[in-house]
Amino acid sequence: MDRADAFLFAIILSLLKCLFIPAYYSTDMEVHRNWMAITYNLPLNQWYRDETSQWTLDYPPLFAWFELFLAKIAATIDPDIVMLQREAVLKFTAIAFQRISVIISDIIYIYAAYQISNTCVETSTNKESKRSSVVKQHTMFLLFILNSGLILIDHIHFQYNGFLFGILLISLNHMMKNNILQSAVWFSILLNFKHIFLYMAPAYFIYILRNYCLSNSQKPGSSHRLTSFIQNLCKVGGVVVSVFAVSWGPFIYTGQLYNVLERLFPFKRGLSHAYWAPNFWALYNAGDRILIAIYKRYQWPITLTTNNITGSLTGGLVQEHHHIILPIITPRITIFLTLIFMLPCLLMILRQPQRSSKGNFLKCVIYCSFTAYMFGWHVHEKAILMVIVPLTLFIYETSSFHFSWLFFMLSTVGTYSLFPLILTPFEIAIKGLILLSYSLFSYYSLFNIYQSTRCYIQWFMNCMEVIYLLGLIPIFIYTELLHYVLLPSENFEFLPLLLTSVYCSIGISWLWMKLSWNCFGYDLFIYFKKKRV
Amino acid sequence: MINNWNFPLLVLCLSFNVLIRCLVGLNGYSGFNKPPMYGDYEAQRHWMELTINLPITEWYRNSTDNNLLYWGLDYPPLSAYHMSALGRLSNTINPSWTNLNNSRGHESLKHKLFMRYSSLISDCLIYIPAVLIYQLDLSSSNSIQHSNKIPTLFIHLLYPGLILIDHGHFQYNSISLGFFIISVSLCIKKRELLSSILFIFAICYKHIELYHSLPFFFYFLGLCLKEKFLVGLFKLFKFAATVLITFIIILFPFLFKLTDFLAVFSRLFPVNRGLFEDKVSNIWCVFDIFYKLRSIDRGVMFILSSCLTILICLPSCLDLLFRPTIRRFLLSSINCSLTFFLFSFQVHEKSILIPSCSILLLIQTSPFIVLWFLFISTFSMTPLLIKDGLIIPYLILNSVFLMISIYIGLLKFRILNYIFDIILCFSIFGSYILTLLLIFVQPPLRYPDLWSMLISVYSCAHFIVFLFYFYTFQFTFDSLSGMFVYNSLKSHGGGVLTKKHKISANKFE
């Protein structure tokens, strides 16, 4: 790829991101500012104990160090930014500083995207195909850095996801180049920045176990299989443990281990967020609602888990959701379901011979995070980005365009599912236009190189999916505009959220099934077919 | 017109442009929180208030309910009708926004939202379609592929000056400029009568469009002269009748009494206002540094400046009169509007949008000089934009505008190869230095306006050179005949043309 072009585009994009400075921001702006204040003003042993503000530090240690680094810079610009206090500091300097810090830290993401798109699409020596591969590299680069979901979350809603995904891409890049140790180091660094990336950890764990520790290729010098296994295990374990030790050591030393863990894994929160992340549980919750409605209408003779129907109906959506007719879900059930569904894919990379498995590893990473998103406990809607961003790597999967279609669908629906996060009236047009631009761009760049498919079933399915996507437009118009005209009463306050959540979760569940078919379902199908013969 | 695969690209280009407009709209507007007079935003709101509460003939007259000193209506009737329509809409949403005399200086988030969306929608309904029609259908010969038109369209719509003024500072320029572009498109399509109607709309929306009136007049007159005597006379009669009827329809409510009509007229052409406002990058403002022109009687200055303007426009217009072709018409509209901006009476810094709009029409054929001009034109409004708190979007958009042109290959740099590239680089560099000085460096106490003055002089010098360039171009392009070939030959050297560029075949002739 032309380096100058990529560089120029990165500058253009970074400048355009600065236009978002006066846009709406969520409470996360104050959350991150408060973290700066905590790390700047308090000694180390108080970081995870402080409760001055309600926005306590609940990211892993490395992120706390990152906030300290930002706070040191911020303090030189305006000491008010790092003031530790109960109330929010909403000064312009604080907001602008944090916005710009996101934009600058995004450079890591842009760099990683550049690297990985060069690795992913091989530059061929043939002159004619070289040009097309350069175009492909550039397109993949653009699709990475323009990701609409990331822009909505990082630059409007406000979070630091960009550079975290940058680290993920660096790690994946190392993995694709077979630098397994480096990849493991980067991934453990990533885990210490934001623990949500644990969703992907099973894939990493199994792949490294299989392809590094249990590697079949014995060098002439190495003596024994078991010794080499132990050697390699020690190497990987050593680097990973040392990263964790550096990160966690000071906090264990100051006796905050329990505090940190309690902050990181808040199982006291409910199954679904206030706005149901559009996963399996959103459908489950909605199913429960419908069953309640039917129950009230026809007076079914069944025993309920709670007697108090009316109470939970009114307050149900605001706080935690209590299931009334369907069984109540506990954290253990969600973990169990997640692992069960991850299992086939993990087994697949455990079985696969070493050579062809790099692509499978990436698929497994995507599949694992998607499964965790579908069945996890208290999943945030933002977690869909952990599927969309790595899925960008598969847009030029040579065998078929299943993956690029999947990417197009998922990035559109997934980003749409983020819309309720941004709710101020002027940003409505902005979020709609960002999604529209990105979807059109991905559609244009992905499908003008593919011929239309001959398979009728495929064609039919694509048609249905396009109709589904177009259905987002009336939903958008209804939830953002018509609802407030037609049903302004407070009883229906949550209807737009419910509608968005259920509609998106139908599409996302379908795409999850499709992804599992493409990742391992088809292989399993072939495997059993052969066995029967 | 557009093949299947370009359709998503086209929609992408439009949606991105609308997105940029929305993002600029997030920023402040002119006169935000600055009593007692506020700014253009308040002017537009005040006109909505006036037009829905007063009878139509009172709009332009001083009365107890209509203090003309507080943002009295000084735009033509079409604009007033538009304000009246918007005022009715805003009245149904929230009556306190347009409450007579009680709503002065009304500022709220919802009202800002309403105003922003109103200018966005008028932009989307008039200006963007106008540019779309002009760029995709008309402006290029067949040799240029459709796919090459979309980048030009993109850049045309992305012009930062108009976006910043309409969606940041707050005005409805896109409507009159949109009408102007449609009327040019109609001219190219040989639908002159319709074109003249649309141009009258443009004038009746914002009379500053009179900057463009001379080329239109002489072009149509030239078309009539080309015919045989009687046919030409009949054609002239048709033009005159069309123009007159359009005017009569638009001005209808004001035609019953002579005093009503005169009231409108005196509001539109306020001779008793100054020669220029604030810091404008035109001749008079620069001249004012050396000799205080404001001490001269306004009447004298008015006559002097008007005569000078007409005198400079005349050669270009006469050329157009005797050789009425579209290409000459476009160049003459650039020359006349730029001359008006540089020499006429009562010029605002925002008036640069009028010449910019006609220069933008040449973006496909000579991108280099056009992009350069556009960059400087936005730069010349820097002091105004800083006053409105639009400095961040201004810096971003103006830089991104150039960078995107380079990225999509419209502007090509071959440094050390062409003298023009080097001059362009210096010119851009100088403008950035002046902007940074204006933002960060305190001017000496004796000259508090030093930096804005320097910006005016700097841009004015550029504009004079551009005027000179386009003027010579109008009279020499016949012999060079290369202007419309630039793009296809990927050459952009402005004036640098060699014999091999001579290809005369062109749709415009």
Image (cartoon, coloured by chain):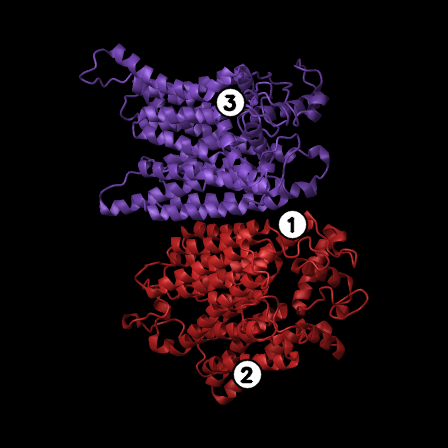
Chain colours: A purple, B red
Alpha carbons under labels 3 and 2: distance apart: 77 Å
Residue picked out by circle 3: A375
Q: Residues within 10 Å of mark 2 (few under 14, many from 20)?
A: some
Question: Taking B251 as reference, is B379 left or right?
Answer: left
Question: Taking A94 as reference, is A448 left or right?
Answer: left
For badge 1, the amino acid type reads: Leu
Q: Residues within 10 Å of mark 1 (few under 14, many from 20)?
A: some
Viewport quadrant of the N terminus of chain A: top left
- Label 1 sits on a secondary structure element that is helix
Nearest to the eye among marks 1 and 2: give it.
1
Q: Chain of mark 2?
A: B
Viewport quadrant of the C terminus of chain A: top left
Residue picked out by circle 2: B236
Seen at 25% across and 12% down, the residue is A225
Q: Chain of mark 3?
A: A
Q: Is residue A41 visible?
A: yes
- Label 3 sits on a secondary structure element that is helix
Up the image or down, A51 lies above or below B153; here it is: above
